Image (cartoon, rainbow, N blue to C red):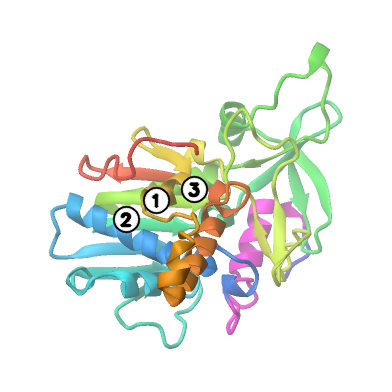
Amino acid sequence: MTNEWCGWREATERALYGPDDGFYTRPGGPGPAGHFRTSVHASPLYADAVATLLRRVDTALGRPDELALVDVGAGRGELLTGVLAALPEEVAARLRPCAVERAVRPEGLDPRIAWRGELPAPGSVTGLLFANEWLDNVPVDVVETDADGVPRRVLVRADGTERLGEPVDGGDAQWLGRWWAPPPAPDGAVSPGLRAEIGRPRDEAWARAVRALRAGLAVAVDYAHERGGRPLFGTLTGFRDGREVAPVPDGSCDITAHVALDACAGPSAQRLTQRAALRALGVDGRRPPLALAATDPAGYVRALSAAGAAAELTDPAGLGGFGWLLEPVGEACAGLLGPPDAA
């Protein structure tokens, strides 16, 4: 890794996706599951819920001869594997599952799953495009206000050392002004040290992903925040071996930042919490009735275990607080999860 000064976007790109020593692309690496726990890894119920959503998309599209499921940021293919196992044979036979991931194809992956390093061509697929914790790993630049309150690009070295660079201008300044303007300080006081992540590359990445669909539904699931409630000091952080660590762009850790999903959203998009989305897909964390323990003890234990897993996925203080962004392409797949619900 070079130790020259550059913006966080360039540094993160090298650290995560460098061809030989990138955190995600390093040969023989464990993938995301080796470092942090996503909804996909938390419980098979998550793949079951995505399978339910896929079946709703299939029905809305009139059960096409070829139905696509594109998993963007597919890790090691765990979600696609789980969805294939959860689908009825009639749907699985028509499904064309595709993983989009910059790491190499893992050994032993189901041969039905296509593996590619780039998004499909615009308008080339019909079905469901699903991006679970992908956008938070699309590299972005970081800015910080200086002593005069002027937003300046943060420069960083591979060892994590930072300094302030030039003032932000052009399209990035426009994005900040629209989507991450800090609250006005009392009496016009200057507020140095405020930080933000410029989400414009994520907006563009999501727009490209949506354009891959000819018809269907695109879904992004991620750590998220909304305009009016952006964190004053940004969200850039790192993860390694299941623990949060300092974000050092040397390839030794994941580097992630929460996503401004409201900036990514197109005019027809729907936003809701994971808790609301999964409940609409039948994931319910309520405990089974105690009477079941007397009549079917084994069934009660299974139901209790499923309820615990569902509770973790829908916990509003944890995974349930993730944001879901649903973007229909064509009218058929609008409103598949009902009206927005922040519960």
Work out whether residue 121 can be spotted: no
Picture residue at 48% right of the left edge, 78% below the top: 104
Above or below, comparing residue 84 to residue 160 in the picture: below
Work out whether residue 284 can be spotted: yes
Which is more N-terminal, label 1 or label 2?
A: 2
Callout 2: 10 Å neighbours few (<14), some, many (20+)? Answer: many
- Hey, what amino acid is under mark 3? Arg
Q: Are marks 2 and 1 in contact (CB under 8 Å)?
A: yes
Q: Nearer the viewer, residue 287 or 99?
A: 287
> Given the current orientation, which residue lies at the most extreme bottom position?
108
Q: Which residue is mark 3?
A: 275
SS of the residue under disc 2: helix
Q: Nearer the viewer, residue 132 or 150?
A: 132
Quarter of the image for the N terminus: give it: bottom right
Q: Is residue 23 magenta?
A: yes
Callout 1: 10 Å neighbours few (<14), some, many (20+)? Answer: many
Which is more N-terminal, label 2 or label 3?
A: 2
Residue 295, image x, y percentages: 40, 71
**Separation of residues labelled 3 and 1 (CA atoms):** 15 Å
Residue 21, image x, y percentages: 65, 76
Picture residue at 26% right of the left edge, 50% below the top: 216
- Hey, what amino acid is under mark 1? Val
Q: Which residues are magenta?
A: 5-30
Callout 3: 10 Å neighbours few (<14), some, many (20+)? Answer: many
Residue 34, image x, y percentages: 62, 75
Q: Which residue is mark 1?
A: 219
